[in-house]
Image: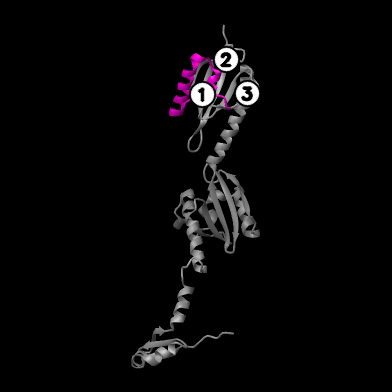
């Protein structure tokens, strides 16, 4: 088993007079140079110095370097992170959590969690945090209205040796998008149930990607025959330019457009219809348009 090497001590005056000798001594064990009887400097070998330098290095592969890297990651992530100890005291708050809670990190550190954030007391999340601290139980789920009305947070509770981490992500916008998508699907279902209005999904090149049964029945074709056909090909020749202009206007201004037109059946009959055109806008660019086809009843 390795034992600690006791250093040798020498006064500064003796060290200067016998430097060559003390340099050789330092190759075997440290030499402490004293000044007025007090330890002032230590002479060690180059190998010992390099070993100490590696142990204190911020090299990413070292334990200290890894810890510092992890701290930097937590500081940079967009999710809010709050670390608490087993007594519920706040040990750390990253910038994202500080912004989300609208409190400076310095004002939160050291405080008991529910004292700093009274909104938590009595909430569903409060019970989950109890289980996190008492039983090291993980949790992941969406929780509504903790800090603000109509806000949804994706919460992850992670047990840590010191206590636990509360990770927060605002998913309100994503859930609103899901709700809006559900509403659009319900609206399309209602339109189909009505049976009097056709609708068609167009690509940015105006080709038909999907159409409901009402539209296909109106025109008198099956799904295979209508798919990838340009929508304007279903219109009377004299109405095609007006439709193309209206579609271009939708793509330029993103506002819905309504035009009167005529759609031609398989038998060659021109039906008077109203076309309501709205853009389908993706996250980065237009993904096409939806056209509602409503027959105009004569008389």
Q: Which residue is mark 2?
A: 264
**Labels 1, 3: front one:** 3
Residue 84, position in %: x, y?
55, 59
Query: Which quadrant of the view contains residue 36?
Result: bottom left
Residue at 56% from the left image edge and 57% from the top image edge = 165
Please provide percent x and percent y for residue 19. Answer: 36, 90
- Judge from the rendering whether residue 33 lies leftward or rightward of residue 277; answer left or right: left
**Circle 1: is it few (<14), some (14-19), or many (20+) Cα within 10 Å?**
many
Residue 262, image x and y in percent? 54, 14
Question: Looking at the rendered structure, which numbered label has been put on residue 277?
Answer: 1
Q: Is 230 covered by the magenta stretch?
A: yes
Sooner in the amino-acid sequence: mark 1 or mark 3: 3
Res 202 → quadrant: top right
Q: Name the residue tied to disc 3.
A: 225
Kindly state the secondary structure of the residue where label 1 is placed: strand
Residue at the spot 49% in from the left edge and 60% down from the top edge: 71
Q: What's the distance in space between the residues labelled 1 and 3, CA to CA?
A: 22 Å
Q: Is residue 253 magenta?
A: yes
């Amino acid at each position: 088993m390795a034992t600690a090497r006791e250093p040798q001590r020498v006064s500064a005056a003796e060290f200067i007079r016998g430097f060559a000798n003390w340099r050789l001594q330092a190759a075997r064990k440290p030499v402490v140079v004293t000044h007025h009887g007090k330890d002032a400097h230590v002479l060690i070998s180059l190998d010992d110095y390099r070993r100490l330098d590696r142990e204190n290095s911020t090299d990413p592969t070292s334990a200290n370097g890894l810890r510092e890297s992890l701290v930097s990651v937590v500081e940079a992530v967009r999710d809010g992170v709050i670390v608490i100890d087993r007594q519920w005291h706040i040990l750390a708050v990253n910038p994202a959590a500080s912004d989300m809670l609208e409190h400076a990190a310095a004002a939160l550190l050291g405080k008991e969690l529910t004292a700093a954030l009274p909104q938590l007391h009595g909430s569903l999340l409060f019970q989950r945090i109890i289980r996190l601290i008492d039983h090291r139980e993980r949790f992941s789920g969406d929780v509504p209205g903790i800090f603000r009305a109509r806000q949804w947070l994706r919460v992850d509770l992670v047990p840590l040796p010191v206590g636990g981490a509360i990770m927060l992500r605002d998913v309100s916008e994503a859930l609103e998008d899901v709700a809006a998508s559900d509403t659009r699907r319900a609206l399309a279902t209602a339109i189909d149930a009505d049976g009097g209005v056709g609708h068609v999904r167009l690509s940015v090149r105006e080709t038909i990607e999907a159409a409901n049964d009402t539209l296909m029945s109106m025109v008198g074709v099956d799904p295979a025959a209508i798919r990838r056909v340009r929508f304007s090909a279903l219109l009377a020749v004299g109405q095609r330019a007006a439709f193309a202009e209206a579609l271009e206007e939708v793509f330029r201004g993103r506002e819905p457009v309504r035009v009167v037109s005529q759609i031609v059946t398989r038998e060659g009959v021109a039906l008077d219809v109203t076309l309501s055109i709205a853009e389908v806008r993706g996250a980065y660019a237009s993904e096409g348009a939806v056209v509602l086809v409503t027959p105009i009843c004569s008389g």
